[in-house]
Image: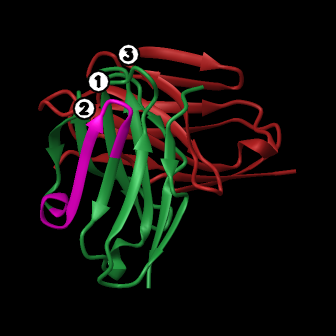
Amino acid sequence: GDQVEQSPSALSLHEGTDSALRCNFTTTMRSVQWFRQNSRGSLISLFYLASGTKENGRLKSAFDSKERRYSTLHIRDAQLEDSGTYFCAAVPNQGGSAKLIFGEGTKLTVSS
Amino acid sequence: DAAVTQKPRYLIKMKGQEAEMKCIPEKGHTAVFWYQQKQSKELKFLIYFQNQQPLDQIDMVKERFSAVCPSSSLCSLGIRTCEAEDSALYLCSSSRDWGYEQYFGPGTRLTVL
């Protein structure tokens, strides 16, 4: 079935450094969302994109508007509070359901 | 921020018992989704309601779960006979319409003993 391949599965950063997460989709997607999940399980929506790029503070996300088969999340100047598990999720272009298909997550650890 | 509410936050059941959890979607949202997450891994889609009608669900839900949205402000997900493999975090989300951004509740953590 439709799949979302997220990488890396784990990432360790020092404070102040930059990095990027990526999700590849096995089929074209209508939209993508990026989430951060904290230790209590709460899932916070970071970005929702139907195309193009969005930026919020030190986070920036892009969704390939042409082929609609990958998305990235850039973290600039990583801080301790950025630690958590990040998930991308996307809605397939085909089919009538609006369900999100999730990647396996990236566990991010930021250290001083 | 969106405010999807879920109750209870924690639920403990014995094998064979029935379980029920509730979700109050964001006011005005017409789409409600349920997902299951085991051991902090990827979320697995369970069922999707649009205007209180189920439009998509996986086979496991058809066979062992009961899910309804009796009103636009309340949905519930039930497990008729709990099994150990049902232990998971159950997350509800809502969006203002088909295909829009989904906002998640805090989840119900079910433990089946």
Q: Please report contact status of discs 2 and 1: CB closer than 8 Å, yes or no.
A: yes
Q: The residue under label 1 is which amino acid type?
A: Gly
Label 1, label 3: how many angstroms apart (C-alpha)? 13 Å
Q: Is residue B107 left or right of residue B46?
A: right
The vertical placement of B74 against B98, above or below, is below
The residue indicated by pointer 3 is A51
Residue A46 x/y as whole percent: 56, 30
| Magenta residues (range) | B60-75
Q: Residue at x 33, y 16 (%)?
A: A65
Q: Residue at x 58, y 48 (%)?
A: A42
Mark number displayed over residue B64: none
Secondary structure beneath dot 1 equals loop
Q: Residues within 10 Å of mark 2 (few under 14, many from 20)?
A: many
Residue in the foreground of this view, choosing between A19 and B74: B74
Residue B30 x/y as whole percent: 31, 25
**Dot 2 or dot 3, earlier in sequence:** 3
Label 1 marks a residue whose chain is B
Residue in the foreground of this view, choosing between A40 and B113: B113
The quadrant in which the C terminus of chain B is found is: bottom left
Secondary structure beneath dot 2 equals loop
Q: The residue under label 3 is which amino acid type?
A: Ser
Label 2 marks a residue whose chain is A
Q: Residue at x 48, y 45 (%)?
A: A87
Is B55 contained in the magenta span?
no
Note whether residue A101 is visible.
no
Q: The residue under label 2 is which amino acid type?
A: Ala
The residue indicated by pointer 2 is A98
Is B61 contained in the magenta span?
yes
User: What is the letter of the red chain?
Assistant: A
Residue A93 x/y as whole percent: 19, 27
The residue indicated by pointer 1 is B99
